[in-house]
Image (cartoon, coloured by chain):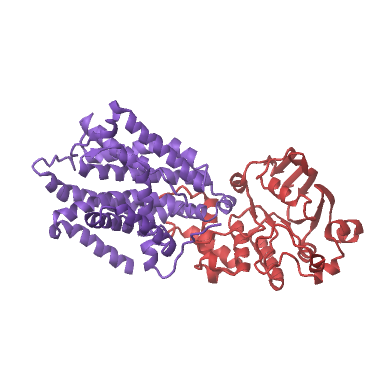
């Protein structure tokens, strides 16, 4: 067991965002967390990544309580994350972004007078990650000039450059074009294998991605775990499919996902499908 | 390559200046070099960490008053020791002040630094016995390299040994800062400037690095402050007044905070422009105010931004 949440509750005033959530992530697993808006996914991510302390229950990572310990401490312990809305350093190049992650992992940040360019190990590791994510051709491109898909990839790549044991991806394909999303996932899963990650957790709305890559799916509904099972079992459960996925999977394949807006960003909630919007 | 050539030419010009230029212009270079040191530090905070301080005159004041107190009260005249003491005093004050300020960002950080600056200004003004109040204190001519230079007139001292001493300090400060911004530490600061949330997710401790940057900038400001006060031979509370903090922010903007050498250019242009404008037009602040407005609107990258091919500056964030 690498990551374990036990009976986690999280309240915002009187509102119960998470109501007794228990889950565990084991060695070698790719786990997806799904659920409609308001199910508590964002809160759960924030609790699992130590940003929020649970109001009750506990979250343990490698047998340590990580409730509210904060992003920096969790990174040191070996957990990394990427964000739903792309987070980049606009003025830094691709290589510098990856170097920053390597510098942080190696604990070199307090070297005030050392030469960054002269540090062979940092350069090499950053370039390796760039190559794994097919970003090496753009190593010296300022991040702000990258196409949206590459920005997303870099956000994830920089988290990988921390060489975490476990990574939490918040909608890794949001903002990526339909044509590219599988390529992105292939790169990502390939990189995870090459780098020896012990587990991946993702929160994802795109059911193609969820059912295509997960070993296990955890469905949240109104702050509770509705189902925790293999993709095949989840798909066979009509009630879960109805409540969480909203429709049969065949339909989701043909409907463009709301996340794929032209800019692919600034979306906190998926917009309703076209038909509903018109009504 | 082009930068290297320009740098060598500038260095040669600075070294040769006292041999060819009238004394008046040579003495004008002294505040330029002092501000140069201040601004290198301020820009580590501003251009590299993304924090705009409106209270750094506080540390200029600490540097200047350290020089005055040591030379008049303690009879310690060695400039090297004065600079060291100024740096230590600034670090001692910046440690708690910075720890508080860096918990805030944007306007709140700016206002908090302003507030601390005003507290210090008031201290200088009201604690008359210690500080000389609004009249300030004398700063006796410091010894350089153990020499008193007593045979030199004031002008000869300033345009000779003191000028070259300032050149060396500015050069050292520049070299050191050049290394700092190109270090792993410098990279961490730039990640914080661009996106603190992402920096934190990569394990960069945002408050701690902001605090380091604040400390370094304070030490630079104090060293610059001690250099600045020596030529006038007197220190007074206006050195620590908030308009002085505003002036140095203006210098950084004028030269361009996105560039390493921008603030140095800003200091140079500011000093010489101020001198020129003041001599022909009594309302020089009017001219500078208009310039500042024009700068923000038309050239947010400052003078360096005008020279650069493209502008890596985003003015309207959010």
Q: Classify residue A121 as left or right of residue B33.
A: right
Q: Nearer the viewer, residue A64 or B49?
A: B49
Image point (15%, 41%), residue name: B147
Evaluate whether residue A113 shows in this view: no
Q: Position of residue B13 (x, y in %)?
A: 21, 61
Q: Quadrant of residue A117?
A: bottom left
Residue B143 is at least partly visible in this image: yes
Q: Is residue B112 left or right of residue B264?
A: right
Q: Nearer the viewer, residue A250 or A268?
A: A268
Q: Position of residue A43 (x, y in %)?
A: 72, 48
Colour applied to chain B: purple
Number of numbered tags placed on the structure image: 0
Measuring from the top left, give residue B17's x and y in whole percent: 17, 58
**Residue visible at 25% across and 62% down in the picture:** B10
Image quadrant in which the C terminus of chain A is located: bottom right
Residue at the top extreme?
A: B129
Chain A visual colour: red
- Residue A24: image location, x then y, percent: 77, 48
* Side (left or right) of A188 relative to B165: right
Kindly identify the residue that appears in the image at 43 percent across and 41 percent down: B114
In this view, the residue farthest toward the bottom is A179
């Amino acid at each position: 067991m690498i990551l374990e949440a036990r009976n986690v509750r999280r309240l915002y005033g009187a509102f119960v965002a998470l109501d007794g959530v228990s889950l565990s992530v084991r060695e070698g697993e790719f786990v997806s967390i799904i659920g409609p808006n308001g199910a508590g996914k964002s809160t759960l991510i924030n609790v699992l990544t130590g940003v929020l302390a649970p109001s009750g229950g506990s979250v343990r990572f490698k047998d340590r309580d990580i409730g509210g310990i904060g992003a920096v401490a969790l990174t040191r312990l070996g957990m990394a994350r990427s964000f739903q809305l792309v987070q980049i350093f606009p003025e830094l190049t691709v290589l510098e972004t990856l170097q920053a992650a390597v510098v942080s992992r190696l604990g070199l940040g307090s070297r005030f007078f050392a030469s960054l360019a002269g540090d062979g190990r940092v350069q090499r590791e950053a370039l390796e990650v760039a190559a794994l994510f097919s970003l090496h051709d753009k190593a010296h491109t300022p991040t702000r000039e990258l196409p949206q898909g590459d920005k997303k990839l870099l956000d994830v790549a920089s988290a990988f450059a921390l060489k975490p044991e476990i990574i939490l991806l918040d909608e890794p394909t949001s903002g990526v074009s339909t044509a590219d999303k599988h390529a992105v996932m292939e790169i990502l899963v390939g990189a995870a294998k090459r780098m020896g990650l012990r587990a991946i957790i993702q929160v994802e709305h795109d059911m193609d991605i969820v059912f295509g890559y997960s070993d296990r799916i955890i469905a949240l509904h109104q702050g509770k775990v509705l189902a925790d099972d293999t993709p095949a079992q989840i798909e066979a459960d009509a009630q879960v499919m109805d409540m969480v996925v909203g429709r049969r999977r065949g339909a989701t394949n043909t409907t463009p996902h709301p996340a794929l807006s032209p800019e692919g960003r600034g979306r906190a909630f998926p917009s309703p499908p076209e038909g509903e919007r018109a009504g | 390559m082009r930068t290297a050539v320009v740098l060598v030419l500038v260095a040669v010009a600075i070294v040769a200046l006292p041999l060819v230029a009238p004394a008046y212009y040579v003495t004008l270079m002294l505040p330029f070099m002092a501000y140069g040191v201040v601004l290198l530090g301020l820009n580590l905070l501003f251009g590299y960490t993304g924090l705009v301080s409106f209270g750094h005159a506080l540390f200029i004041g600490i540097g200047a008053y350290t020089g005055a107190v040591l030379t008049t009260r303690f009879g310690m005249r060695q400039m090297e020791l004065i600079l060291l003491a100024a740096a230590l005093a600034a670090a001692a004050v910046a440690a708690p002040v910075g720890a508080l300020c860096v918990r805030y960002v944007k306007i709140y950080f700016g206002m908090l630094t302003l507030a601390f600056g005003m507290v210090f200004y008031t201290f200088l003004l009201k604690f008359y016995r210690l500080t000389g109040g609004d009249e300030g204190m004398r700063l006796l001519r410091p010894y350089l390299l153990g020499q008193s230079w007593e045979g030199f007139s004031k002008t000869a001292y300033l345009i000779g040994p003191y000028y070259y001493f300032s050149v060396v300090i500015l050069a050292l400060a520049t070299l050191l800062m050049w290394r700092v911004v190109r270090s792993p530490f410098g990279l961490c600061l730039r990640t914080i400037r661009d996106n603190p949330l992402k920096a934190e997710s990569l394990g960069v401790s945002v408050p701690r690095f902001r605090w380091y940057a604040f400390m370094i900038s304070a030490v630079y400001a104090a060293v610059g402050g001690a250099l600045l006060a020596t030529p006038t031979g007197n220190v007074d509370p206006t050195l620590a007044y908030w308009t002085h903090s505003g002036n140095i922010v203006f210098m950084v903007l004028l030269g361009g905070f996105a560039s390493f050498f921008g603030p140095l250019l800003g200091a140079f242009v500011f000093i010489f422009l101020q001198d020129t404008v003041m001599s022909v037009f009594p309302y020089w602040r009017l001219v500078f105010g208009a310039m500042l407005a024009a700068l923000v609107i038309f050239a947010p990258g400052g003078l360096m931004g005008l020279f650069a091919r493209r502008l890596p500056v985003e003015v309207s964030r959010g």
